[in-house]
Image (cartoon, rainbow, N blue to C red):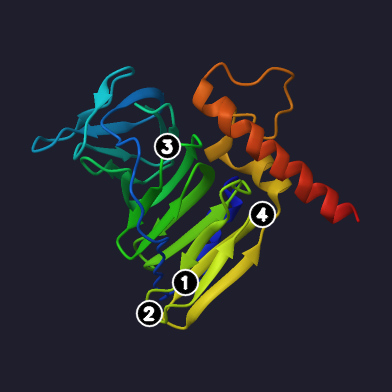
Amino acid sequence: SRNWFLAIPSLALGMSAALTAGAAHALTPITSAEIREIVRQVQFVPRGQTARPAILSEIMRPDDALQTMRSSRVGLRFNDGSWARVGEMAVFRFIPGTRNFRLNNGTVLLLIKPGQGRTTIDTPNASAGVRGSALFVRYDEQTETTVVGALTNNPNGPMEIIDNTTGRKLPLEAGQMAIVDPLGIRLFNFDMHRFYETSDIVRGLDLQRREAQPSPEPGIAAVQAETSQAFESKNRSLDL
């Protein structure tokens, strides 16, 4: 599979996960998101209405939802300039008056501009929080498994992953991913080079900064500076 890391939850059938990153006051509430990218079949579900095909440039509001079909994805630009890319077979929404996102299945990549306040993403059994960062979160409803992977070393400190069952906390840095289940929290390293080369969720975003110019989108460019630095730092440590 091109999305090699998405197979990881299948190695842990029957697991459940619980992650959180502590409460903090948001500085810039998420109030809207513009649909900037549609690949194949994406359904838009306005609050209280039935699903219909999503349209480029339309605006998603709190409590609206997006559903992606197989081999599909959707890209969103939020009112603070941050970005999300929602992968296949996902249900995604954001919560009014907060910086909280909800993922009921599938995978989302979040590129959060620094300085906007703490952002959290919730799954049916997990919550992960950051202050400006790039991360992927996957929830598999069949195995009740949440996986969180870090693509940056946040200047404000690493993501803090908390096992809600035991209360145990672990930091999560670039090139690491966490799975938490009733047996405890576990930390893994993953191959960032392979991830960038093979995962559709980051395709075309140039988070390694191979191109001379940064992204014309300020929100992506702000995160590129951190993702490329983390990528280079990880590669240097592997060469030592």
Q: Looking at the image, is mark 1 or mark 4 earlier in the sequence?
A: 4
> How many circles with numbers are drawn on the protein?
4
Name the element at disc 3: loop
x and y percentages locating residue 35 in the rendered image: 34, 24
Question: Residue at label 4?
Answer: 175
Question: Residue at label 2?
Answer: 165
Q: Which mark is residue 52?
A: none
Estimate the spatial distance between the alpha carbons at disc 1 and disc 2, rounded to whole Å: 9 Å
Question: Residue at label 1?
Answer: 180
Q: Looking at the image, is mark 3 or mark 2 earlier in the sequence?
A: 3
Q: Residues within 10 Å of mark 4 (few under 14, many from 20)?
A: many
Q: Looking at the image, is mark 4 or mark 3 earlier in the sequence?
A: 3
Name the element at disc 2: loop
**Residue 10 visible (yes or no):** no
Q: Looking at the image, is mark 1 or mark 3 earlier in the sequence?
A: 3
**Furthest residue toward right:** 240
Q: Is residue 148 above or below residue 35?
A: below
Between marks 1 and 3 in the image, the one whose residue lies nearer the viewer: 3
Asked whether disc 1 touches disc 2, contact meaning CB atoms under 8 Å apart, the reply is yes
Estimate the spatial distance between the alpha carbons at disc 3 and disc 2, rounded to whole Å: 30 Å
Q: Which mark is residue 116?
A: 3
Tag 1: residue type? Val
Left/right placement of residue 118 relative to residue 96 reads right
Tag 4: residue type? Gly
Tag 3: residue type? Gln
Estimate the spatial distance between the alpha carbons at disc 4 and disc 3, rounded to whole Å: 23 Å
Q: Residue at x 12, y 35 (%)?
A: 50
Tag 2: residue type? Thr
Q: Looking at the image, is mark 4 or mark 2 earlier in the sequence?
A: 2
